[in-house]
Amino acid sequence: MKRRTFLRYAAAGPVAFTLGATVRVESALRSRPNIILCMADDQGWGDTGYNGHPVLQTPTMDAMARAGIRFNRFYSAAPVCSPTRGSCLTGRHPYRYGIFHANEGHMKPQEVTLAEVLKGLGYRTGHFGKWHLGTLTRTVKDSNRGGPEGAEHYSPPWENGFDVCFSTEAKVPTWNPMVDPKTGTAYGTRYWREDGAIVDEDLEGDDSRIIMDRAIPFLRRAIEAVTPFFAVIWFHAPHMPVVSGGKYLAMYEGQPDERAHYYGCITAMDEQLGRLREELCLLGATENTMVWFCSDNGPEGQTGSSPGTTGGLRGRKRDLFEGGIRVPGVLEWPARVVQPFSTSVPCCTSDFFPTICNVLGVAGEDGSEPVDGIDLMPLIEGRMTQRPHPMAFESGNQLALLDNRYKTVSLDGGRSWMLFDLAGDPGEERNLADEMPELVQAMREKLESWRTSCANSRDGQDYGGSN
């Protein structure tokens, strides 16, 4: 049975947070915005012009940061792809629903997604790009797990609330996505439609443009039908295989080859974000459309050798240090963000779900289930200066808890701990654990309480005792 009512998990215990299938009449007209969640794949916090990159050109991201809310401390719920994506759609940490890493687990049918909630409210829903929350076919070999051998992980977007889909299970090359750039043969990951059919037309050139070619007609049809829409646009750029071409590659002539391709594919993605903004303007939909943009985790590769940058933050993809989970984050929503501003309040991909549900005035019915994200409307309206509850993380043997100032980290499953003052040391260079043992202990206790709650979720307690 799908859940209807939730508890938001605070470090001090569960806090009531409800949602369901009804909208408060008094706020229905003003609070039914169109909603777009855009996400890059493996783009580091420093991989934008507005965060100070000396070479990379991202004029659209820069414009979005100037026009809306620029999140200086925006976090992915995990330091790897699949877990973060699930957090965007459920508001829950991946250790609740059992997607611990990339190519593991799948979106369970008991989990309620944003697409399902919004579809129930009359929204038209669409997913475009990388899914990575389950396989898309039981019948033919596809991508990493698709086909008969991975049938138990079949959970495509069209069975999780999405009406229209142009989706891949996992990564593809960022230029000519169906072609292996090393061999020139078929890459092996396909795009699929909502009817379970393979898409085999118009798949040449920049992959971000190919994705946006499918997303824009979806927006047009929804607006023509006077129907609010929810569009999830999850780009593959700049995930490996990183390939660029044409004018985008020419823009970075003189750069080492690997960097030219990396920068080129991000600039190409940035251009498609610009195309999206222009289309919303032409359709008269800019004012009341929420456009979120972030990355799913930090940059791939080793510091110094990889073209992706964290902007000086410690760690990278797969790390719970800041460089692995602090990512670019922007929100544009002219109807409610009238005056642009930047914020250093910690925010997270898990916050999308409760924020959007609360914007729509969704009311609860019965039952309860933990949600890890918080409603960001007080922040959007200028009334939040601190995050009310700490943000918890777990990935493999790594654990972390951060609040508005401090962050504790363990790399060995909780046997030893580090403590950092992120306000004065965002690069996590000075370990304060020996100087502030009481704070470390208090944060550890909160983290262990949260881990117990997650374990209960995995054991099926959120689904009436059966998972």
Image (cartoon, rainbow, N blue to C red):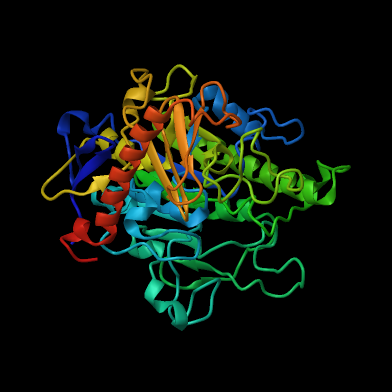
- When asked about the image quadrant of residue 195, the answer is bottom left
Horizontal relation, residue 219 to residue 118: left or right: right
Image position, residue 259 (x, y; %): 78, 46
Q: Nearer the viewer, residue 85 or 157?
A: 85
Horizontal relation, residue 76 to residue 306: left or right: left
The relative height of residue 103 versus residue 439 in the rendered view (above or below) is: below
Horizontal relation, residue 268 to residue 127: left or right: right
Q: Is residue 284 visible?
A: no
Q: Residue at x 44, y 30 (%)?
A: 346
Pick out the residue farthest to the left: 366
Which quarter of the rendering shows the C terminus?
bottom left
Q: Residue at x 26, y 41 (%)?
A: 9
The relative height of residue 406 versus residue 302 in the rendered view (above or below) is: above
The relative height of residue 79 versus residue 424 in the rendered view (above or below) is: below
- When asked about the image quadrant of residue 15, the answer is top left
Image position, residue 436 (x, y; %): 44, 26
Which quarter of the rendering shows the N terminus?
bottom left
Horizontal relation, residue 13 to residue 435: left or right: left
Image position, residue 160 (x, y; %): 34, 60
Q: Nearer the viewer, residue 246 or 293?
A: 293
Q: How many marks?
A: 0
Q: Is residue 78 visible?
A: yes
Image position, residue 243 (x, y; %): 73, 56
Pick out the residue farthest to the right: 254
